[in-house]
Image (tube, grey):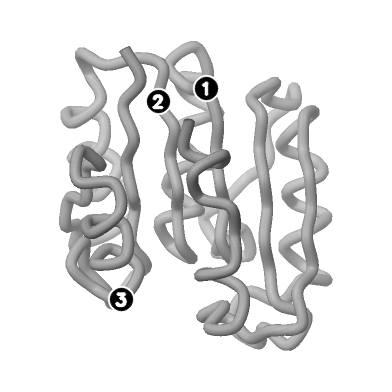
């Protein structure tokens, strides 16, 4: 059975703008809250997914970083990743020795100054073998792009 999860950004929550969007359209989507370090957040995420597979994860910024880390450590659990301006430029992130073969959709704003495309895209290309990249005319929060994505297709 497919499980949909939204992973929020560093200073956000599962009830922020994107989380609220998902709760109104995909009420079964998990939207857990995270705080603490990357390691602390990953321990919590591991406990959430420990008995689940067929995961479709939408991760925004730091949540995209978390989704990428999960895919490196547990690719067999994942069906698809949707990475929204993922923080693959975070200093603790290391690309894997072998690329992860999980369907991955990356959406990033060309004017993103938090997760600059010129840093994030090469990291994504070195992480994922099945990668689609969209560089949107947008900023880090993807205000113009987020609501226009075909979420029904992406999350099914």
**Image coordinates for residue 117, horizontal then vertical, percent:** 77, 71
3, above or below 66, in the image: above
Marks 1 and 2 in Cβ contact (< 8 Å): yes
Q: Quadrant of residue 104?
A: top right
Q: Residue at the spot x=44%, y=32% of the render?
A: 56
Q: CA distance from mark 1 to mark 2?
A: 5 Å
Image quadrant holding the N terminus, namely top left
Residue placed most toward the observer, 92 or 10:
10
50, above or below 96, in the image: above
Q: Residue at the spot x=52%, y=29% of the render?
A: 71
Q: Residue at the spot x=22%, y=18% of the render?
A: 50
140, above or below 15, in the image: below
The residue pinned by badge 1 equals: 79
Q: CA distance from mark 3 to mark 2?
A: 22 Å
Label 2 sits on a secondary structure element that is strand
Mark 1 / mark 2, whichever is N-terminal: 2
* 139 sits to left or right of 33: right
């Amino acid at each position: 059975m497919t499980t949909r999860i939204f992973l929020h950004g560093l200073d956000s929550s599962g009830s922020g703008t994107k989380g609220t969007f998902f709760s109104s359209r995909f009420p079964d989507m998990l939207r857990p809250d995270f705080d603490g370090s990357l390691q602390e957040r990953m321990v919590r995420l591991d406990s959430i997914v420990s008995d689940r597979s067929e995961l479709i994860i939408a991760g925004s910024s730091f949540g995209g970083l978390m989704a990428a880390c999960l895919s490196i450590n547990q690719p067999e659990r994942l069906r698809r990743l949707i990475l929204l301006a993922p923080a693959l430029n975070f200093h603790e992130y290391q690309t894997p020795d072998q690329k992860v073969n999980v369907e991955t959709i990356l959406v990033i704003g060309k004017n993103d100054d938090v997760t600059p495309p010129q840093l994030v895209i090469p990291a994504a290309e070195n992480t994922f073998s099945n990668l689609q990249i969209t560089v949107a005319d947008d900023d880090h929060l993807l205000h113009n792009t987020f609501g226009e994505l075909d979420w029904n297709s992406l999350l099914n």
